[in-house]
Image (tube, rainbow, N blue to C red):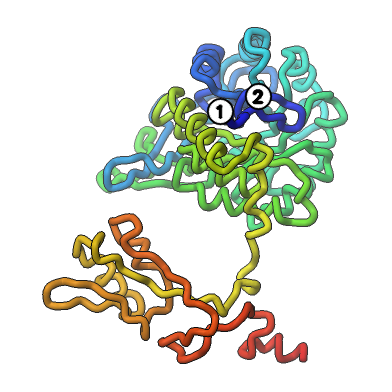
Amino acid sequence: MANLTTNFIGIKSPNPYWLASAPPTDKEYNVVRAFKAGWGGVVWKTLGAEGPPIVNVNGPRYGAIWGADRRLLGLNNIELITDRPLEVNLREIKQVKRDWPDRAMVVSLMVPCDEESWKAILKHVEDTEADGVELNFGCPHGMSERGMGAAVGQVPEYIEMVTRWVKQHSRMPCIVKLTPNIADIRKPAEAAKRGGADAVSLINTINSITSVNLDTFSPEPMIDGKGAHGGYCGPAVKPIALNMVSEIARSPETADLPISGIGGVTTWRDAAEFMTLGAGNVQVCTAAMTYGFGIIKELTAGLSQYMDQKGFTSVDQLVGRAVPNVTDWQYLNLNYVTKAKINQDLCISCGRCFAACEDTSHQAISMSPDRVFEVIDEECVACNLCVNVCPVQDCITMEEMPKGAVDPRTGEVVGDYGNWTTHPNNPMAKAAE
């Protein structure tokens, strides 16, 4: 049976699933329930500096995006960091860590951007015997207007500066949480590494307005007739998160930087995908808020079964497996040719493939009077749209044409590997000759 235990930058946990810094990790009661359910670790909801507690809104804090079946696809969150007194949080963190020594306990932090503020809170956190800290440089709302959160995460020089302070004044492993609200995620990751970060975590929430109430004409969630941008999370952000994780994992400057993957992890498959792209573990929030802490049983069982099927005995064997296969467009094989193929035994004659291809693609699917749908190879460019709109899994597949065969669309022989860098239509390739 696969061993799911992880050792992420020296922080051990019985499985790679941590709860992300968010409402589910705001207090001892929640965290204890999570550990009893089987979660491997938590990142405690972000603590702020000593002084008057943070003030949150007292109206709705979440907006939502749903699929056609009302399945939650994304949440827009306008809640700020913890509004519970610092001393209460610290006391509870210390107690939980003592009661659950085998679970990962990481504390998220966000304080004003000066060295003394960071030095002060780090001393308090060390006294709790927590395993590490996560620097919240990603929150895009509320705190960023005060010069914290994403306001720091969008400036690599600030990331490097604060990370150096943390490493100078603390013995604890340091994870830097990155904002996705930036043009090139590699730059803040490089800054975190220069500052001495032990790892990065990403992505934090995406700046967003999820909807507008068309009766009151205000963004949701609405507070007394007004709305504000917030942080978007959930299954809908997973593709963005996967790309950013892979960018860091395959960049020569940051390839050796450990990554904690965040962003829409809902199933064990999601977690496995993050890990194959370089994440040493994953953090979960929206899925737990949607389905409760009990989903950890499915997450661990599914990952364990998958690893057994693949012959992997440890999570480390999965981490980074897909990174060598991530490339840039110009290196893709332009001589790889496929054609769509419809399995008539599985086809339910709904016609969605025909409508999509006929109206919006390449008119490569024919429809007979008795609604039999067939691919016209001479027109098929292998765009894959028909596969994606078909409601029956594996009814339409993409079949590779063998080398030496003639593509009926172009009349050309399928050849060996060739990419854009050497293609005759590439003016740069001609210039290099």
Q: Amino acid at mark 1?
A: Leu
Q: Residue at x 34, y 47 (%)?
A: 212
- Residue 362: percent from left, percent from top: 35, 80
Q: Residue at x 31, y 74 (%)?
A: 357
For residue 158, which quarter of the picture?
Answer: top right
Q: Amino acid at mark 2?
A: Ser
Q: Which mark is residue 350?
A: none
Q: Look at the picture and state if 366 lies above or below 386.
A: below
Residue that protrudes farthest toward the right in the picture = 168
Q: Which mark is residue 13?
A: 2
Q: Secondary structure at mark 2?
A: strand
Q: Which residue is mark 1?
A: 19
Could one spot residue 158 in this view of the protein? no
For residue 90, which quarter of the picture?
Answer: top right
- Residue 10: percent from left, percent from top: 76, 28
Nearer to me, 130 or 326 = 326
